[in-house]
Amino acid sequence: KNEVEQSPQNLTAQEGEFITINCSYSVGISALHWLQQHPGGGIVSLFMLSSGKKKHGRLIATINIQEKHSSLHITASHPRDSAVYICAVRRETSGSRLTFGEGTQLTVNP
Amino acid sequence: EPEVTQTPSHQVTQMGQEVILRCVPISNHLYFYWYRQILGQKVEFLVSFYNNEISEKSEIFDDQFSVERPDGSNFTLKIRSTKLEDSAMYFCASSEWSGGNTIYFGEGSWLTVV
């Protein structure tokens, strides 16, 4: 079983819809990252969370440490949000390395 | 905004050849990383580097791999004798400090071993 599980694997939405991507992990962590991978392959860091909630523009990320679960929300989705969204965790016991989930392919249609 | 730069963006090499992938991390960052992503798979950690030495490495990072910071700005990944299964996108990343800091990734270097 993967230490980091994301759902759904694939998500198709209409422009303007509210999007939720979920991440569950099975290990103790010191931080959780949400990342965006563009079609060309480049990876951009969106959020780094260790507790609570963060917001940046139309993106909101939440984490529940007790339940080992995080969500990434996109409000008023737009076709330019189409990308792979990846959850990655820094384990308490593993120094600085990140352990990645499989990613969620999001497609937003106009 | 500062960025991590990687070269080459794409390299094709013969099996058994040595390959060096180069990275210029963000200038005030102290922690450097290499990750790889085989096509269709998730991103995997290879190695982290701090204070001119490896701080952590994965089981993937065997004797065929090495890292170096030759001149205080570049950070390189060398694969000594490439195998077909080394074909992947290799990402360099850097962060200001460890333990829960934002990590910045380069655009990646596509390595194709034929």
Image (cartoon, grey):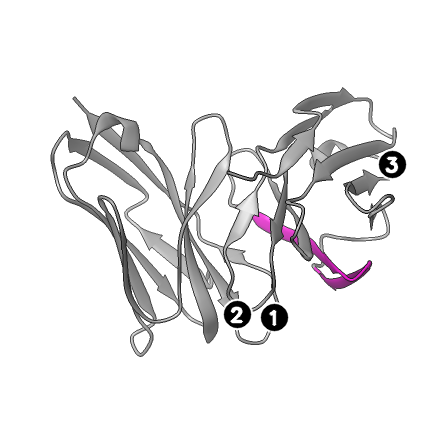
Q: Is A88 placed left or right of A107 in the picture?
A: right
Q: Amino acid at mark 3?
A: Ser
Mark 3, residue position: B81
Task: Please tell me whether residue A36 is drawn above or below residue A51 in the rendered image.
Answer: above
Residue A14 is inside the magenta segment: no
Kindly identify the amino acid type of the residue bearing the numbered disc 1: Ser
Say whether mark 3 and mark 2 are on the same chain.
no
Q: CA distance from mark 3 to mark 1?
A: 29 Å
Mark 2 and 1 residues: CB-CB less than 8 Å, in contact? yes
How far, Cα to Cα, is label 2 from label 3? 32 Å
Q: Report which residue position mark 2 lands on.
A: A91
Q: Is residue B114 visible?
A: no
- Indicate which disc residue A94 carries: 1
B34 with respect to A44 (left or right): right
Looking at the magenta stretch, what is its main secondary structure?
A: strand
Q: How many marks?
A: 3
Q: Which residues are magenta?
A: B43-57
Badge 2 element: strand
Chain ID of residue with mark 2: A
**Chain letter of disc 3?**
B
